[in-house]
Amino acid sequence: MKIKRIIISLVLLGAMWFSGCGDPSMDMTDVTYEPKLVVEGYLFSGQPVTGIRVMRNFGLGTPIDTTSLYIADARVTVNGAVLKYNPVGHFFYHDTMIARPGTSYNIQVSGTVAGKFISTSASTTVPEGKYQILHKDLGSHTYDDSIYVAILPTCTAEFYAFSIIPLTATVDNFAFENPFVGKQTRDDIIKNLNRYKYQMNILLNVQKNSTELIKQSIKAFDAWFYSQYRVIVYGGDTNFKNYLLSKNVEEFDGNFHEPRQPLSGDGIGVFASAVIDTVTFEIRK
Amino acid sequence: MKQIYILLACLALFVPFIHAQKVNDVTGFVYDNKDGEALIGASVHLKGRTTGSVTNTSGYFVLTNIPFGKYTLQVTYIGYKPLSVDIEVNSNEFKTLQLKMTGQALVTKEVMVVADSVRTIDRLYEKPISKIDLSSKQVNQIPRVIEADLLRALQTLPGVTALSDFSSALYIRGGTPDQNLYLVDGTDVYNPEHAFGIFSTFNTNAIKKVELSKGGFSAEYGGRLSSVLNVTNLDGNRNQVEGCANISLLSASATIQAPLGSFGSISGSFRRTYIDQTYAKWNTDIPDYYFYDGNLKAYFDLGEKDKLTLSYFTSKDNLDFKEDKSKPSSFGFYYFWGNKTSSLNWKHVFGSRIFSNFWATYSYFNSDFNMEQVNFREKNNIHDFSLKGALEYYLADDFDIRFGFEHKFLGGALMQEFDNGNADVAKERTHSVAYISSNYKPWDALSIEAGLRYNYFNSDVDYHNFEPRFSAKLRLTESSNLKFATGLFHQYLNRIPRLFFTSIWTTSDEYVGVSSSQHYIFGYQKAIDEVYEFEVETYYKTYKNIYQYNQLAFVEIEPSGYKDGKPYYTSTKGLFNSGDGESYGIELMIRKDLGAINGWIAYSLSRTNYTFTDINKGQEFIPRHDRTSILNAVVNVDWKGFLAEMKGTEVPENENKWLFTFNFVYSTGQPITVPSSAYFLNDLPDWNQIRGGGEDIPGYSLYPSGIDKYRLPAYIRMDASVTWEIKMNGWILAPYLQVFNIGNRKNVWFIKYKSDLQNGQITQTIDKVNMLPMLPSIGVNIKF
């Protein structure tokens, strides 16, 4: 009886050991693809309604041809006016419509994606007023200098995004002396050039219509190249903020959460408005 | 306090009335003869009488209304030789007995141990429903990730779920870690975590006893929705100096206990990692990081009626990170966090029938993060000063009343400084509690406990909540019990878990309401052959108004105001998503504590559902900690004892030992939210990332499917350890080898989606990120 128990125990132990081996496979083929219209639409205060792109989404695991992103035959209206399509720039535009400060605009988009006719809509209100940038040319600096954009937020925008882009961005003018480079090699830079080139800063919950000066620093991790830089400052509405801050829905542990995007129905993306202006500076050795 | 005295005075009125007859009470304390530690749960009865008593958490017992005469008092306790003492009850004098029991080995002479001890079914009957006890030895035997860890040991029990290999957090019966109350010597502990949660702060060598209540707990406990983990540290050896030390690949620790003359004892332990002094010196990629923890406890025996305990605990994690240690200007940050707790406990016997415990406790957690190069600094703290009293009034052998109070001064602060804004949240709250609970045995086979707990939480909004509790135990047959418990529980604290940052605690206020949970638990217990304990429990829990950190809090949070044009934040508005939920399941466990082969096998089948307004479009979803099935097996083998059992012989007590331990776990995979499609959008209007250059494609984005609709592959792991216990001259030297994940199974932690752009074609692939591989570790334990 005891021997029998020992044999059973050893078999169980072996079975547990065996089951605790291996490399489980992940099969994600049963994830259902849902066709969506992908909208990229921004209205800039005082500027024509243009540059609105309509694209499609793709099922996971399917090869994607980047030239077939756009839905050229989509129907796009803004406040009821039908927009035209520019096949060269792949965007929709209106000949005469201007984005007026304080005015609300509603976009309606419909089209066919993966054989399914779908539609989406969203609304945005263009911020009133215009913020002021104190110095539009910040001059030439080294990494040891303090650089900042000074703004008087004299408009209704409560959210600011700073797009910081070097006019020249190659591995040859990459600043390896930047204290944030760490142990990155030349090959690493070439591989991730895109990531170093496009930088942004954001300011949340700025007091609207305020005359208190705001200073936004340009830090070493905002500028990776020895180059002239162009900073476009967007004073955006809530849609702008929600899209930009919630676009990345992948958490550190690989899980996903839902974004806060303004498009209802079968839409992904952004329809937002902003007041814009530009600043320049240079980083030298 | 005034109310307590009035209550005590009222209760005292009963005592003379009862004592008017020629009867008296027999009371006393039961201690371990070897080290003087109080024995919790020892069975005490008078030979020839049916009624008996069980020692409380201080080792105290009362046998009421014993007629004058001569008796033999019998005390039994698992692992100890039975004790018989002749006593005479002949006056109304109040006297407490000081009884000392002598231990005996549990691993051999299984039949004798069983025959000498209290019956298994009686032990099971006395235990409250959903409560599991573990000894320090059991905790230390379970193979571990390098370091013995209390919380990881508890993860092997039914109804307790681990999230991953990298987390020691406990998810109990569908509850989240912030719904667990951690008590160390009566003190609440917040964030008991080292190394971002990989290890817990409990030093297993300093532990005397661990009690985990998985639900349905009595009115004595509250403030959390799911469970209570009650850790009692060693009081200290009252007879001789005793110590142990451990050296593992990660840390070194030592514990020492010593008598303080004839009136008390002291114990202390300390543990520190030494990566920063060893590996980090050779490998510059390893950051300078260490943690330590230590505790000190002094026990003073102030007489028959008064015992005083002082305890202190401290822990600290220290991380000094530099991306490139060779460059002084390299990016880096400094981060430290830690706990400090202290408690003063006074046990007093007010007459034979009123046993009391009074505590003054203080718990403090703080963290400090400083990333100077980006002008970001965060300081976070929570402090809790509590005054508590718990009294037990034994009206008769079949009827006792427990009542008490608690008053907490609770506070917390979060300070964040960053460019163009700051958060400065400092809140002070008070939480007052009063409870009463009575335990009545209408007949020998039935025991009923009914209680009521009242909470007053003073915040921006005042909360008054009553919590009725009820439980019943029935001896079904000579070898089986039936149990039931139900109760309402409230929680006024919420935790914001943060990856690579310590958690922040917030309290109920004008934006975040009180959470509540109702428990219903049925249990069945059976003793098999006096050696095996078999338990089945099924439960149903509801959650109302529970909170989960809002992943988009930074999008939705609104400033409380502006100072010099910069926003500041002082409220919790927008920090949480709120909703309701339910958990239900069944747990089976067969456990054997005696003999050369011991351990437990546990299986749980469960389900948790949440419904939150802003998650999954308001539809029901399964939270990420849900696991449908979990199978655990922990087997300890004393090889020589096993061979002796086979031969029917005995192993001499001083013989060296080979100890093998196996731990197996199977768990359904973790629910995850996966993307349903990919799309391309630039982050900002003037960007053109898709064709920007480089190999990665930042314009590529993923859109999620339904929340937690998919599951990772099943988690399976087996661990093994071997310990050679060498005994010489009263010392025990025990070198060990442990192998975590001995099958080297590549359990999936999470999946990452990758995309590659070549010739205008984007291909998408999935990468698995695995949990810990096979991880051997060695070390040595020394005892003297």
Image (cartoon, coloured by chain):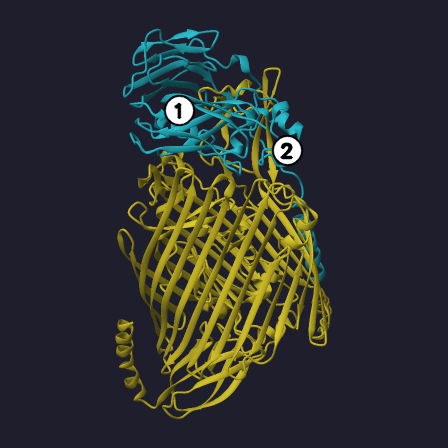
Chain colours: A cyan, B yellow
Amino acid under disc 2: Gln
Q: Quadrant of the C terminus of chain B?
A: bottom right
Which residue is found at the position 37% from the left and 29% from the top? A151
Q: Quadrant of the N terminus of chain B?
A: bottom left
Which residue position holds label 2?
A184
Q: Position of residue A248 (x, y in %)?
A: 47, 30
Q: Is residue B321 left or right of residue B502?
A: right
Which residue is found at the position 44% from the left and 78% from the top? B307
Q: Nearer the viewer, residue B755 or A86?
A: A86
Mark 1 Cα within 10 Å, few/some/many (few <14, many 20+)?
A: many
Mark 2 Cα within 10 Å, few/some/many (few <14, many 20+)?
A: few
Relative to B183, say whether B649 is above or below. below
Which residue position holds label 1?
A234
Q: Nearer the viewer, residue B556 or A237?
A: A237
Chain holding disc 2: A
| Circles 1 and 2: CB atoms closer than 8 Å | no
Q: In 3D space, how far apart are the residues under numbered discs 1 and 2 (Cα atoms)?
A: 31 Å
